[in-house]
Image (tube, helix red, strand yellow):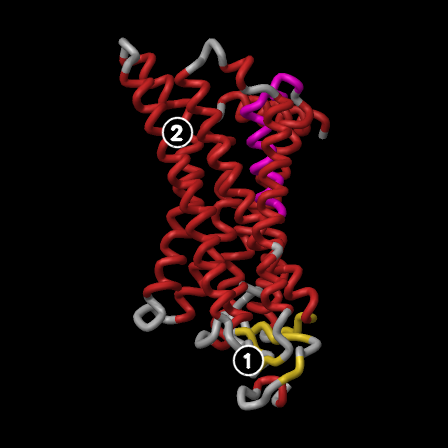
Amino acid sequence: MTETLQFNSTFLRPAFFILTGIPGLGAAQAWLTLVFGPMYLLALLGNGALLMVLWIDCTLHQPMFLLLATLATTDLGLATSIAPELLAVLWLGPRPVPYAACLVQMFFVHALTAVESGVLLAMACDRAVAVGRPLRYPTLVTKARVGYAALALTLKAVAIVVPFPLLVARFEHFHARVIHHAYCAHMAVVELVVGNTRANNLYGLALSLAVSGMDIVGIAGSYGLIAHAVLRLRTHEARSKAFGTCGSHICVILAFYVPGLFSYLTHRFGRHTVPKPVHIVLSNIYLLLPPALNPIVYGARTKQIRDRLLEVVLFRKKQF
């Protein structure tokens, strides 16, 4: 282990990396399992229950709920792509991760993040049509089109994220095997590379601006159309009902983009002012908080899902 923690050696494409978790916290980082562990458990149970309800209730097989099922599936994958390794590192200390497994994790983390951002944009567009064109909604938004949209979002995420591991795999030499992070983040691995990493840095920046930036602009435009349509309604009751249909989605958007934006800004512009442990904790919260909160938000604010879930729970209790 002592040899693997040296920084003054050059390695020819190491067979494994060492994930250290959150540097600077030492044994105290084990206590963070009390934060991230419940988050992961909530993500598993909440999204699993949400998918179960959406599957067994045929009345919920509608475009809006199919998009919600896509979001829940993405959340399950995103949380599972980092949480098991994260919890193991925090609890047991530095752990080796094979080189190939590190690249695979890097791909899934960034790809599923891109899919989630795209699904949130699709849900915003769905709400804009539902509020702005309610009479044409059944013909404009169909289950088939939702399926095509989900497939397109997945293929887009794969296409734009595949270069991440490929750009790392082109390097033969690394000056260390130790990744000062809790998972194989792209830039955390790039910091270990011996060579010119400008292409990695530029592609990472361009991808963040092109994907998240365009999705945020699209979401803002959709809600601009929603606000315009709502303000044209004559009664206060109609306005409240229209805004109520978007309340859950707005909460989910804030839970995903606010931590993500803060993490991105601290990484890009606050490297010398924000301690690295704070940045790493924020990046893990950004990936685990939305999957944990999304099913709670939709379960609490969506009447159809809440009522159906209560029916399932009460039926189970009666059986016992």
In the depicted structure, whether residue 222 falls above or below residue 284: above
Q: Which residue bears the numbered disc 1?
A: 194
Amino acid on which disc 1 is placed: Val
Q: Main secondary structure of the magenta part?
A: helix
Residue at 63%, 42% in the rendered image: 155
- Amino acid type for the residue under numbered disc 2: Ser
In-front residue for pair 88/82: 82
Q: How many marks?
A: 2
Q: Is residue 75 left or right of residue 285?
A: right
Q: Residue tagged by mark 2?
A: 222
- Residue shown at the point (48%, 37%) measured from the top left: 120
Q: Helix, strand, or loop for circle 2?
A: helix
Q: List x then y, in percent, for residue 88.
A: 62, 66
Residue 262 sits inside the magenta stretch: no
SS for dot 1: loop
Mark 1 neighbour class, 10 Å CA radius: few under 14, some 14 to 19, many 20 or more? some
Q: Which residues are magenta?
A: 58-77
- State how far apart marks 1 and 2 are (Cα): 44 Å
Could you tell me if residue 59 is visible in this image? Answer: yes
Pick whichever of labels 1 and 2 is earlier in the sequence. Answer: 1
